[in-house]
């Protein structure tokens, strides 16, 4: 009776395997023919992203990967064949595991929704957490209130607020500053005539948060500005929209450590600057040790505008005119909690602002968000666009604007 039962069991298993393989060939073949060419490019991009999330040794030396052609019929046959063999193997493995289930210990899953810390490293306590000083916003008319941002950065512009502070006019890294955060605003907080201004345009839709100025690239008849993108990491983003990215830098950041990037960015800026030390700083000390890079983009669904690393700083490329026409001045932190009546106490800090708007692929933004998710600190509160502060008045903008046309490909 036992032999008969065993034989019956084996016949059943063979039947299941044969039916499964036959189903895969019949159903999977046309599916592969239809979807494989369309997904090849995105799969390459996703593999590149996964490398960064799960321990790439050098994320700065990546090159754009573009498929050279559509896969041949023989390639598709090979894919289906491999999938078929894999399915058979999976069924056999499932049966073996089921037999062994009673003797095996229960497994504990350590997988999460993200490959955030693939080696389960313990970085210890976040020494930067809570380092933001408790300085409330203040009415702008208060005597002694410092210069504010975002300002007009049109070439030739200068503010009217007198200041004796000098901004950093060289690359931040040359002064010992490192990036401590990356975030972006809905529309541009700065104003650059002819680049991001009152004549800019974008998709008409509801927005959470105040929208700033827009660039003028948007064309409703051009698919790259309207075709939806399948966002995997960034939240609430829209193709065709303008966003201004900010990269706060600080000489007091936890540079070259797992805790370098922080949300909120204030924690990163003040990480190694205790309250007692802050009291002894002059206004020039602040402007010489804290700075922000700013660059505005219109997002497109087009891989011709892909850039592999938006995470570590603004793009500087003389050939493409990126990061070369710069406005440099001292101002403040921004955001919708500030206006021309309520000002930021976090001033004066250096701003290095690209006056030109650029196109960037949605996949570039999404990759940046994925890199943010891989940091030791939780940056989830910066994965979406923040609202934009209204353009500050001439009376609140510093009178120390430096007009700079940078040459070479040196990263600010």
Image (tube, helix red, strand yellow):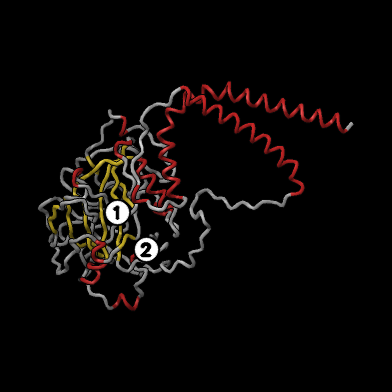
Residue 211 image point, x, y percent: 29, 46
Question: Foreground mark, 1 or 2?
Answer: 2
Q: Mark 1 points at which residue?
A: 313
Residue 386 can be seen, yes or no? no
Badge 1: residue crowd in 10 Å (few <14, some 14–19, many ≥20): many
Badge 2: residue crowd in 10 Å (few <14, some 14–19, many ≥20): few
Image position of 78 with respect to 216: above or below: above
Cβ atoms under marks 1 and 2 closer than 8 Å: no
Residue 53 image point, x, y percent: 45, 50
Residue at position x 31%, y 37% from top? 300
Image position of 156 with respect to 223: above or below: below
In the displayed structure, does residue 336 sit left or right of residue 110? left
In the displayed structure, does residue 285 sit left or right of residue 115? left
**Mark 1 to mark 2 CA distance (whole Å):** 15 Å
Residue, far left:
156
Please tell me in which quadrant of the rendered image residue 38 appears. top left
On residue 186, the disc is none
Q: Mark 2 points at which residue?
A: 256
Residue 11 image point, x, y percent: 76, 26
Please tell me in which quadrant of the rendered image residue 176 appears. bottom left
For the N terminus, the image quarter is top right
């Amino acid at each position: 009776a036992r032999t008969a039962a065993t034989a019956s069991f084996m016949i059943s298993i063979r039947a299941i395997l044969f039916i499964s393989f036959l189903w895969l060939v019949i159903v999977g073949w046309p599916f592969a023919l239809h979807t494989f060419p369309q997904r090849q490019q995105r799969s390459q991009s996703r593999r590149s992203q996964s490398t960064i999330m799960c321990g790439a040794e050098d994320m700065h030396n990546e090159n754009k990967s573009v498929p050279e052609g559509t896969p041949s019929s023989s390639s598709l046959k090979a894919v289906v064949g491999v999938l078929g063999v894999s399915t058979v193997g999976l069924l056999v493995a499932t049966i073996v595991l089921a037999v062994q289930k009673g003797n095996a210990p229960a497994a504990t899953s350590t997988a999460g929704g993200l490959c955030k810390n693939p080696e389960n490293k313990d970085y210890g306590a976040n020494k930067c957490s809570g380092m933001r000083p408790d300085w409330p916003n203040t009415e702008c008319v208060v005597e002694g209130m410092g210069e504010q941002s975002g300002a007009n950065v049109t070439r030739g512009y200068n503010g009217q607020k007198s200041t004796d502070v000098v901004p950093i006019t060289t690359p931040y890294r040359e002064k010992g500053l490192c990036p401590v955060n990356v975030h972006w605003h809905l529309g541009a907080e700065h104003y650059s005539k002819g680049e991001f201004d009152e004549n800019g345009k974008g998709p008409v839709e509801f927005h959470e948060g105040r929208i700033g100025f827009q660039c003028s690239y948007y064309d409703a008849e051009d698919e790259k500005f309207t075709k939806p993108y399948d966002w995997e990491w960034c939240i609430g983003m829209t193709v065709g929209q303008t966003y201004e990215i900010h990269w706060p830098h600080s000489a007091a950041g936890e540079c070259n450590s797992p805790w370098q990037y922080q949300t909120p960015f204030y924690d990163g800026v003040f990480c190694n600057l205790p309250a007692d030390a802050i009291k002894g700083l002059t206004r020039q000390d602040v402007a010489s040790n804290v700075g922000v890079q700013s660059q505005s983009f219109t997002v497109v669904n087009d891989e011709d505008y892909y850039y592999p690393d938006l995470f570590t700083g603004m793009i500087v490329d003389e050939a493409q005119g990126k990061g070369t026409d710069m406005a440099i001045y001292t101002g403040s932190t921004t955001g919708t909690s500030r206006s021309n009546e309520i000002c930021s106490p976090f001033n004066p800090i250096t701003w290095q602002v690209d006056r030109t708007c650029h196109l960037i692929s949605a996949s570039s933004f999404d990759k940046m968000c994925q890199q943010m998710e891989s940091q030791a600190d939780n940056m989830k509160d910066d994965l979406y666009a923040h609202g934009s502060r209204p353009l500050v008045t001439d009376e609140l903008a510093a009178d120390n604007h430096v007009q700079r046309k940078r040459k070479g490909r040196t990263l600010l």
